[in-house]
Every structure is written in structure tokens, then in C-alpha cells.
Amino acid sequence: MDILWTLLTLPYAPVRGLTSVVKVIAREAESRQYDPANIRRELEELDRAADAGDITPEERDRGQQRVLDRLTSAGDAGADTAATPARPPRRRPARRRAAGQARRVDRRDDPERRRGR
């Protein structure tokens, strides 16, 4: 059966391969974005540029705020789920009846019962 399934889904192999490559690239980009060494380097570059006069102190503050916002958003939602929408709460599964167990019927509002039958 596996051989048959492999042959039937063979035309989709490039799509599956591309999907896995995109997942690897996204994971690597995310890990670099939240890497403490990269964040420290960005903040040091902002300080160096402000000391050299390339940017104004307000621009440095805005750049630092962007970096900190990125960190706090990753801490709130988690690096893995930052783009994933929140899932609704799980519902309890319905109870299954055992074999031969009849369904309970509420007969309080049964018109036949009201007539005395």
C-alpha cells in the first residue's frame, strides 16, 4: 500500500519538498531574529551610530524601542507561535454509549403522558 500511495502522490513531491525548505528557512530566520548576540549587536550599532553623529539620539531611541518591542512580542506569544492565531477552547468530547444502552428520553413533556396513557 505504501508503494501505491508513493506512486499516486509522486506529482506532489516538489510541493512537499518546497514546503519543508520554507519551514527550515523560516525557523532559521526566526532563531536569528531573536538571538541574544544579534540583538546586542543591533543595540551596539545604534549606540555607535549615535556616538559618531550618523543618527540623532531620537532615532537611536526609536531603533532601540523597535528592538525591545520585537523582544517583548516574542516573549508574550512565544517565538514558535508569534504568527499563529489563538485557538478556541477545546470542547469536551461527546459521551459514547455502550453497546445496547438505550438513549434516555425525557417524557415529562410528552403529550401522551399528559392524557393519562
Image (cartoon, grey):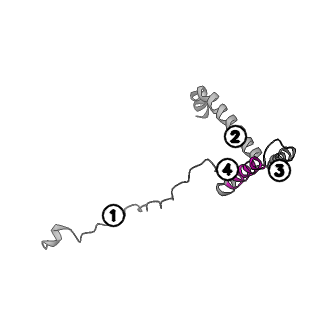
Disc 3/disc 1 C-alpha distance (Å)? 65 Å
Residue 75, above or below 1: below
Please report whichever mark, 1 or 2, sits nearer to the chain's N-terminal start: 2
Look at the numbered disc 4 and give the secondary structure of its residue.
loop
Look at the numbered disc 1 and give the secondary structure of its residue.
loop
Disc 4/disc 2 C-alpha distance (Å)? 10 Å
x, y percent for residue 43: 81, 49
Question: Dot 3 surroundings within 10 Å: few (below 14), some, or many (20 or more)?
Answer: few
Reply yes or no: does residue 1 show up in magenta: no
| Circle 4 residue | 80
* Magenta range: 57-72
Disc 3/disc 2 C-alpha distance (Å)? 21 Å
| Circle 3 residue | 40
Look at the numbered disc 3 and give the secondary structure of its residue.
helix
Tag 1–tag 2 contact (CB < 8 Å): no
Please report whichever mark, 3 or 2, sits nearer to the chain's N-terminal start: 2
Tag 3–tag 1 contact (CB < 8 Å): no
- The nearer-to-camera label among 1 and 2 is 2
Disc 4/disc 1 C-alpha distance (Å)? 45 Å
Reply yes or no: does residue 60 show up in magenta: yes
Residue type marked 2: Ala
| Circle 2 residue | 26
Please report whichever mark, 4 or 1, sits nearer to the chain's N-terminal start: 4
Residue 41, above or below 111: above
Question: Dot 1 surroundings within 10 Å: few (below 14), some, or many (20 or more)?
Answer: few
Residue at left offset 16%, top offset 67%: 111
Residue at left offset 71%, top offset 43%: 27
Which residue is at the front of the view, 51 or 66? 51
| Circle 1 residue | 103
> Which quadrant would the C terminus be assigned to in this image?
bottom left
Which residue is at the front of the view, 12 or 66? 66
